[in-house]
C-alpha cells in the first residue's frame, strides 16, 4: 500500500515543489500564513493549510490542531521540508516513526537552523544533506540517507548553497520512493 504524505514547510517551499511534482501530496502545511510555499501549492493544485502558533493558547493546542488535520487526511508520512518549528511532544506522540526531515548538512555535523552557514563559517572541505527520522532532539533522529557535498576552491557561500539544494532535490525523492510514497 502506498503511503499518503503531507509536507510541512515554513517558507519558500522549493523542496515541497520537487516533492509535489513527483509524488501525490495530500496537503502542504505551513506555520506562516504568508509563506511562498502556499502560493506554490496553489499553482500545483495541492491543498494547503496554514495556521500559526500565536493563534493558539500554547504549543500543545497548536500541535493538537495539526494532529486533527493529519487524521482528517489519513496521513501515513509527514515530510518536513524547511519546516522551522521544533516538533513537540504532542505531534511526536501521535506520529513518531512517521515524520522525516531534510537537513542541509551531513549530520551529526552542524545541526540546527543554519546548517549551511555553520558549515561554511567553520571552513569545512565538505558538508552535505541528510534525511532522518524526527525524534525529540534537534536533528538527532536516525539517519535514513546522506550525501556528501564538497566545498570547491572557487565556491562562494551562494554556489555552495546552490549545490546543497540541488542535492536535496535529488535525495528527497529517492527517500520517498524507498519509503513507499505514492507517485503522481
Image: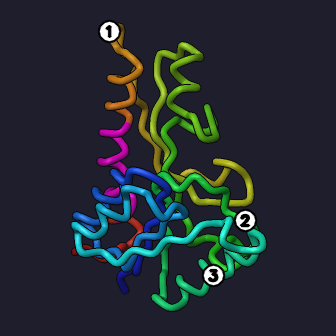
| Picture quadrant of residue 28 | bottom left
Of labels 3 and 2, earlier in sequence is: 3
Q: Which mark is residue 77?
A: none
10 Å neighbourhood of mark 1: few (<14), some, or many (≥20)? few
Q: CA distance from mark 3 to mark 2?
A: 13 Å
Question: Percent position (x, y) of residue 125?
Answer: 47, 15
Q: Which residue is mark 3?
A: 65
Discs 1, 2 touching: Cβ within 8 Å: no
Of labels 1 and 3, earlier in sequence is: 3
Taking 13 as reference, is 92 left or right?
Answer: right
Closer to the camera, 24 or 127?
24
Q: Which mark is residue 88?
A: 2
10 Å neighbourhood of mark 2: few (<14), some, or many (≥20)? some
Of labels 1 and 2, earlier in sequence is: 2
Q: Which residue is mark 1?
A: 154
The residue depicted at 53 percent of the width and 26 percent of the height is 117
Q: CA distance from mark 1 to mark 3?
A: 47 Å
The residue depicted at 53 percent of the width and 82 percent of the height is 70
Closer to the camera, 62 or 72?
62
Q: Secondary structure at mark 1?
A: loop
Q: Secondary structure at mark 3?
A: helix
Q: Is residue 40 visible?
A: yes
Q: Nearer the viewer, mark 3 or mark 2?
A: 3
Taken as a whole, is the magenta stretch helix, strand or loop? Answer: helix
| Picture quadrant of residue 65 | bottom right
Q: Secondary structure at mark 2?
A: loop
Q: CA distance from mark 1 to mark 2?
A: 40 Å
Q: Is residue 56 above or below residue 164?
A: below
Amino acid at each position: 500500500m502506498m503511503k499518503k504524505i503531507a509536507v510541512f514547510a515554513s517558507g519558500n517551499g522549493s523542496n515541497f515543489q520537487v516533492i509535489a511534482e513527483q509524488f501525490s501530496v495530500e496537503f502542504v502545511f505551513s506555520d506562516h500564513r504568508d509563506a511562498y510555499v502556499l502560493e506554490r501549492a496553489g499553482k500545483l493544485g495541492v491543498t494547503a493549510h496554514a495556521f500559526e502558533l500565536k493563534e493558539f493558547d500554547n504549543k500543545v493546542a497548536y500541535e493538537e490542531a495539526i494532529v486533527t488535520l493529519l487524521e482528517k487526511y489519513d496521513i501515513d508520512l509527514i515530510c518536513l521540508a524547511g519546516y522551522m518549528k521544533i516538533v513537540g511532544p504532542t505531534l511526536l506522540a501521535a506520529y513518531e516513526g512517521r515524520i522525516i526531515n531534510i537537513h542541509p548538512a551531513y549530520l551529526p555535523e552542524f545541526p540546527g537552523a543554519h546548517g549551511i552557514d555553520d558549515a561554511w563559517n567553520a571552513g569545512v572541505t565538505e558538508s552535505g544533506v541528510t534525511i532522518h527520522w524526527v525524534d525529540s532532539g534537534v536533528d538527532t533522529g536516525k539517519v535514513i540517507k546522506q550525501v556528501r557535498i564538497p566545498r570547491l576552491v572557487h565556491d562562494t557561500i551562494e554556489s555552495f548553497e546552490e549545490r546543497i539544494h540541488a542535492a536535496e532535490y535529488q535525495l528527497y525523492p529517492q527517500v520517498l520512493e524507498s519509503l513507499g510514497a505514492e507517485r503522481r
